[in-house]
Amino acid sequence: MELISNAQLVDLHAPVGVANPEFPGRLQVLHEHFAGFAVGEPASREQVELVHAARYVDSIKSIDTLVWLDPDTYAGASTFDGALLAAGCAIHAVEVGGFALVRPPGHHALESSAMGFCIFANVAIAARHAQRELGLERVVVVDFDVHHGNGTEEIFRHDPSVLTVSLHQWPFWPGTGGPGSNADGIVNVPLSAGSGDAEYAHAFAEIVEPAVAAFAPDLVIVAAGFDAHRDDPLAELTVTVEGFREVAARCASMSPRLAAVLEGGYNLATLPTLVEAACEGFGA
């Protein structure tokens, strides 16, 4: 699986003088770990506005100093460029069947607002591009980040051409995706604190894989968050390196066409190993 990124993503969207778990070091350790990657280019405004309101895109573009868009999400003068570049790398990933190593992440971003470290909905933008430009009509998003992929879910809630699947800790931030939240086109798998490899394998075998098979996708896009790892500082799930390799392999088995986009993962010591394991599972 081809890795896609851009050296500029390390420096763009940087919280000057602010401590935040989503910071340039996350991508820097990945660039240092992997020998090389294909260089992604920025998404166009037209591509971003396939899922975001023009007024919201304008609001991000207009930022010229450090601001807080919600209690967790900062933005600055370079955020717009960084977010466009992240979305563009995600688009490249669906074009070539690759894994986009990007920041800021995207799965909490809503049509008209940022949320939870996320500015533009990278996976959702890539999914729309795949449908519009690549003729891949039926798309599944499988999100194994420890937090519920609420933004992606809301963007596609009323779209029967996209199935969103999210496995996540529950109860937990952002407070969505709990029991009883499933609907047509929405599969949520809330997992209790302490859940790990066995619970993920069971969820895939009993819930995720049957739902995806019934949907018969042309493309699976993985929202690949690694904060469900047992040593991640932001959550309480216990997935191991081997567990992520297995989850990635299960994702790869569900469709003849696959792409992945980085979401969470905040332990810099473990993140490169986890991404490498996922690549092995995806069949890189």
Image (cartoon, rainbow, N blue to C red):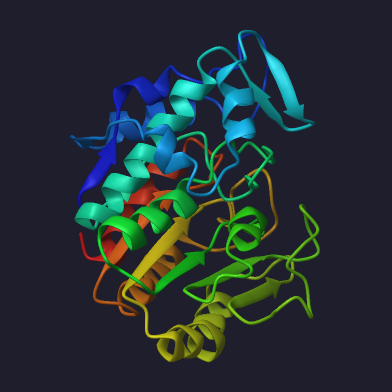
Question: Horizontal and vertical percent for residue 241?
Answer: 43, 59
Q: Nearer the viewer, residue 269 or 105?
A: 105
Where residue 225 appears, as percent x and y from the top left, is 51, 53
> Where does residue 39 sit, x and y in percent of width and height?
22, 32
Among the 4 quarters of the image, the one containing residue 68: top right
Is 33 placed above or below 248 here?
above
Q: Foreground residue, 4 or 18?
A: 4
Q: Is residue 24 visible?
A: no
Residue 56 in view in this figure: yes
Q: State the count of labels.
A: 0
Residue 183: quarter of image: bottom right
Of 215 and 160, the residue lying toward us: 160
Q: Quadrant of the N terminus?
A: bottom left
Above or below 147: residue 44: above
At horizontal 38% and vertical 72% (from top left) the residue drawn is: 251
Q: Quadrant of residue 120?
A: top right
Residue 245 image position (x, y, % from top left): 37, 65
Rendered position, 112 above or below 149: above
Instruction: Please state if 23 lies on the left or on the right of 115 as rendered.
Output: left
Residue at (21% x, 37% y) in the render: 37
Q: Residue at x 54, y 63 (%)?
A: 239
Quarter of the rendering occupied by the C terminus: bottom left
Left or right: residue 68 compared with residue 208? right
